[in-house]
Amino acid sequence: MQGKGKLLKVYVGESERYRNKPLYQYLIKWLREKGIAGVTINRGIEGYGQDKVVHTTRLLELSADLPIVLEVVDSAEKIEEILPELCQMVPKGLVFSTDIFIHKYGK
Amino acid sequence: MQGKGKLLKVYVGESERYRNKPLYQYLIKWLREKGIAGVTINRGIEGYGQDKVVHTTRLLELSADLPIVLEVVDSAEKIEEILPELCQMVPKGLVFSTDIFIHKYGK
Amino acid sequence: MQGKGKLLKVYVGESERYRNKPLYQYLIKWLREKGIAGVTINRGIEGYGQDKVVHTTRLLELSADLPIVLEVVDSAEKIEEILPELCQMVPKGLVFSTDIFIHKYGK
């Protein structure tokens, strides 16, 4: 897998749940089952989205729902294939993609 | 808000201050007041910028100024509107943007 | 340094080593010596790559090799110059680049 690809970024809240599981844990499991090439998850220290509530490590009551960011990498075709179902799983989240050029993917 | 957009990334030092506040905390407040769609903040574990000093969690004396990265998402017009003022607020920082395609933003 | 540039993202495992050093620490030192404009390193909380093993902070035995992400920023020429050697240093990693527009880089 080299050449043109897509980076998909998915932003959800840490406390969001899906089928009795934290949403982001469900998503990584689901993406792996779909055969997606690579996924990395980060937890932000602060952020806000559509509802404009700032979640932050600085305030205890707002630190329970910190932003979780998934970086999903694969070919454009593979990313487009999973997008409709993925977008339905993240009702409150932000999902965007950008074009990348993959120079190396493992051996 | 769907379709073409911009991702703006802003890199500052954790110890930088602006008007008696940590700079990155001032920035997220300011971006929210400007009505920017979404902001996520991450703290890096290591990094360097223009002055080429590596700040790292591995060395106590250099861990007080870890890199802070703001990811700012909105339409191209909105991002361009705030850029001049934003750039003045981050004298030492790195600011860059990239084109994105927004597939989902909340409900 | 303003105008068109490249963001290079490099994903490695925290436990990977190179010349008696953690690989990511070797890389930041090497990139600085090459005169690269800016580097930021993040540690993910979870992720998988080519071998499809999910490394996660949630399982002790899989938390020793969390994903490490380097964000490397410079001009397209400078990034292309270092790419061949860099790709050889990360046999198991993912390396991709994307076009950016640099609005500000320090003073």
Image (tube, coloured by chain):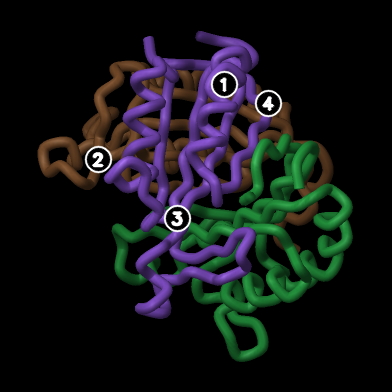
Chain colours: A brown, B purple, C green
Give left or right: position of C24 versus C5.
left
SS type, badge 3: strand
Q: Which callout, 1 or 2, points to the residue nearer the camera?
A: 1
Q: Which residue is mark 2?
A: A56
Can residue A32 be seen? no
Q: Are marks 4 and 1 in contact (CB under 8 Å)?
A: no
| Chain holding disc 3 | B
SS type, badge 1: helix
Spatial CA distance of label 3 from label 4 is 25 Å
Residue drawn at x 60%, y 90% is C20
When the figure is inspected, residue A102 is found, relative to residue A107, above or below; the finding is: above
Nearest to the observer: residue C84 or residue C34: C34
Q: At label 3, which amino acid type do we have?
A: Gly
Please determine if labels 2 and 4 lie on a single subunit: no
Instruction: Name the image quarter holding the C terminus of chain A.
Output: bottom right
Nearest to the observer: residue B5 or residue A105: B5
> Which label was assigned to residue B13?
3
Please determine if labels 3 and 4 lie on a single subunit: yes
Q: Which callout, 2 or 3, points to the residue nearer the camera?
A: 3
Nearest to the observer: residue B47 or residue A43: B47
Horizontal and vertical percent position of residue C6? 76, 45
Q: Are marks 2 and 4 in contact (CB under 8 Å)?
A: no
Give the crowd class for mark 2: few <14, some 14-19, many >=20 residues within 10 Å: many
Q: At label 2, which amino acid type do we have?
A: Thr
Horizontal and vertical percent position of residue B107? 37, 9
Please determine if labels 4 and 1 lie on a single subunit: yes
Residue drawn at x 63%, y 78% is C26
The numbered mark, 4 or 1, whose residue comes first in the sequence reads 1
Q: Which residue is mark 4?
A: B99
> Which label was assigned to residue B79?
1
Can residue C76 be seen? yes
